[in-house]
Amino acid sequence: MKKQEKQKKREDDQRWTLADRLGAETEAKLLAKKRALAEEEQRCRAAEEARRREEARRREEQKSFAELLEESALDWRKFK
């Protein structure tokens, strides 16, 4: 009889979700925190991407004539 009661109690405990155990207020706080962290991560990614673009732009401005000439697809032999 005790085994059946313990088994039934375990089954009842397993049916509960995390939201049921924590309560609505705590669940709402956790969801808000999750959203805030996701937004912060998105802002960091956007800032990092902007920094990379700015760095690439600066590198492009600082290139010497020799570097620009080497990157050029033009072949001087064609225009000789």
Image (cartoon, helix red, strand yellow):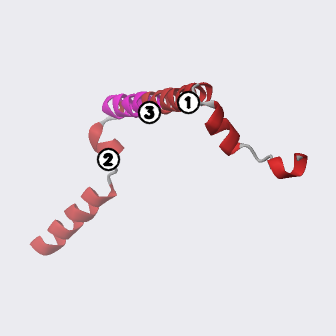
Q: Is residue 12 left or right of residue 2?
A: right
Q: Would residue 1 be visible to someone looking at this image?
A: no
Residue occupying the far right of the picture: 79
In this view, 73 is above or below 67: below
**Distance Cα–Cα, label 3 vs label 2:** 25 Å
Magenta span: helix, strand or loop, mainly?
helix
Residue type (three-letter) at the residue carrying disc 1: Arg
State yes or no: residue 28 in magenta.
Answer: yes
Mark 1 and mark 2 residues within 8 Å of each other at the beta carbon: no
Q: Is residue 9 magenta?
A: no
Residue beneath disc 1 = 59
| Residue that label 3 marks | 41
Q: Which amino acid does the dot numbered 3 rest on?
A: Glu
Helix, strand or loop status at disc 3: helix
1 or 2: mark nearer the eye: 1
**Residue placed under numbered mark 2 in the picture:** 18
Q: Nearer the viewer, mark 3 or mark 1?
A: 1
Spatial CA distance of label 1 from label 2 is: 51 Å
Q: Secondary structure at mark 1?
A: helix
Q: Is residue 70 left or right of residue 41?
A: right
The percent coordinates of residue 76 (x first, y second) are 81, 47
Q: Which residues are magenta?
A: 25-39
Mark 3 to mark 1: distance in Å?
Answer: 27 Å
In primary-sequence order, the first of circles 1 and 2 is 2
Q: What residue sits 80% from the left and 46% below the top?
A: 74
Give x and y (percent) for residue 71. Answer: 68, 44
Amino acid found under the numbered disc labelled 2:
Leu
